[in-house]
């Protein structure tokens, strides 16, 4: 029996500066599908130079819907999800190829992700191994339709199994990038909660923010990651507070009168 074909799938926007390095670690897959949400830089040129099939879906529908649309464009048997700021290591490639050499059609595979943050790989704070479900047969499953924090759906009869080899994650270029990215996630989270009729309060945000810091820096040994661990724990606590503050503003305050 021949080896099943594999597609690497990415959703992107304005990733010209990082995309080429990512795609260079995927030159061994059978197909690359890139779903763009309205880039204004050279993202399309970079993707097509690497042989990717490039699609555009704009305006942005949310992470889950965009991933579902991207998967619908895949022609290969298996799907490997990668973000533009991630890099597939040689060990991870070997692990994936071993799965494809003896494929199991009812299993979704998790990948350990190692993140580089502010000049250091973060191995504590609850950030490593940070396993993410990224590899599965195309017809087996896909992502849910959540606007943010989307997840691969694991239905009855679907198993999960771990892969070896890290997926390197160069997550934030600088502090401004972190704050902008975090604010976007907070807004999507608050919008999703609002749609479900949920409300928020500043006291919730404060309690969850403090809890976030204690969990990351103390319970999950973020102090072992040095100054980066302290900064990341503080920023994560702030981001947690902002989520609830955003929801409180949306649901408990009045808009200005014209």
Image (cartoon, rainbow, N blue to C red):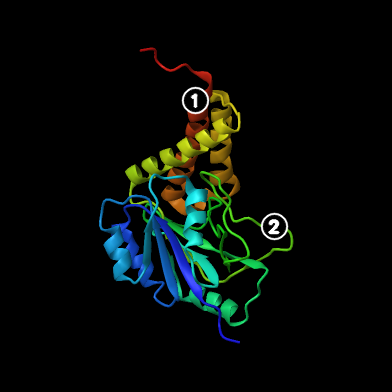
Q: Residues within 10 Å of mark 1 (few under 14, many from 20)?
A: some
Q: Quadrant of the C terminus?
A: top left
Residue 83 image point, x, y percent: 43, 59
Name of the residue lying farthest toward the bottom:
1
Q: Which mark is residue 179?
A: none
Residue 203 image point, x, y percent: 57, 24
Name of the residue lying farthest toward the top:
257
Give the answer, above or below, for where 15 lies relative to 192. Answer: below
Residue found 34% across the figure and 62% down from its top: 19
Residue 112 image point, x, y percent: 54, 63
Please give the count of numbered marks on the rendered protein.
2
Mark found first going from the N terminus, 1 or 2 = 2
CB contact under 8 Å: marks 1 and 2: no
Q: Nearer the viewer, residue 196 or 213?
A: 196
Which mark's residue is nearer the viewer, 1 or 2?
Answer: 2
Give the answer, above or below, for where 123 lies relative to 198. Answer: below
Quarter of the rendering containing residue 198: top right
Q: Report the Cα–Cα distance between label 1 and label 2.
A: 34 Å
Secondary element under disc 1, as helix, strand or loop, is helix
Q: Nearer the viewer, residue 31 or 188?
A: 31
Residue found 62% across the figure and 81% down from its top: 102
Identify the residue under disc 1: 250
Residue 211 image point, x, y percent: 58, 37
Identify the residue under disc 2: 155
Secondary element under disc 2, as helix, strand or loop, is loop
Q: Nearer the viewer, residue 136 or 212?
A: 136
Residue found 58% across the figure and 30% down from its top: 207
């Amino acid at each position: 029996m021949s080896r099943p074909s594999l597609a690497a799938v990415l959703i992107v926007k304005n990733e010209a500066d990082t995309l080429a390095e990512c795609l260079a670690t995927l030159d061994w897959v059978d197909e690359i599908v890139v779903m763009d949400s309205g880039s204004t830089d050279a993202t399309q040129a970079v993707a097509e130079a690497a042989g990717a099939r490039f699609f555009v879906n704009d305006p942005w529908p949310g992470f889950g819907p965009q991933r579902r649309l991207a998967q619908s464009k895949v022609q290969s048997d298996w799907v490997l999800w990668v973000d533009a700021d991630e890099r597939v290591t040689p060990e991870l490639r070997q692990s994936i190829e071993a799965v494809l050499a003896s494929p199991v059609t009812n299993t979704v595979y998790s990948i350990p992700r190692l993140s580089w943050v502010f000049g250091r790989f973060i191995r504590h704070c609850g950030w490593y191994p940070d396993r993410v479900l990224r590899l599965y047969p195309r017809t087996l499953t896909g992502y849910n339709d959540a606007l943010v924090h989307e997840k691969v759906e694991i239905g009855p009869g679907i198993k999960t199994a771990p892969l070896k080899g890290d997926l390197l994650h160069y997550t934030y270029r600088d502090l401004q990038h972190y704050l902008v990215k975090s604010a976007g996630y907070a807004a999507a989270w608050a919008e999703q909660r609002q749609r479900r009729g949920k409300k928020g309060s500043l006291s919730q945000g404060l309690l969850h923010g403090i809890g976030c810091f204690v969990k990351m820096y103390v319970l999950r040994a973020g102090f072992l990651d040095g100054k980066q661990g302290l900064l990341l724990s503080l920023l994560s606590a702030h981001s947690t507070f902002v989520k609830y503050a955003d929801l409180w503003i949306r649901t408990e305050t009045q808009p200005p009168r014209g």
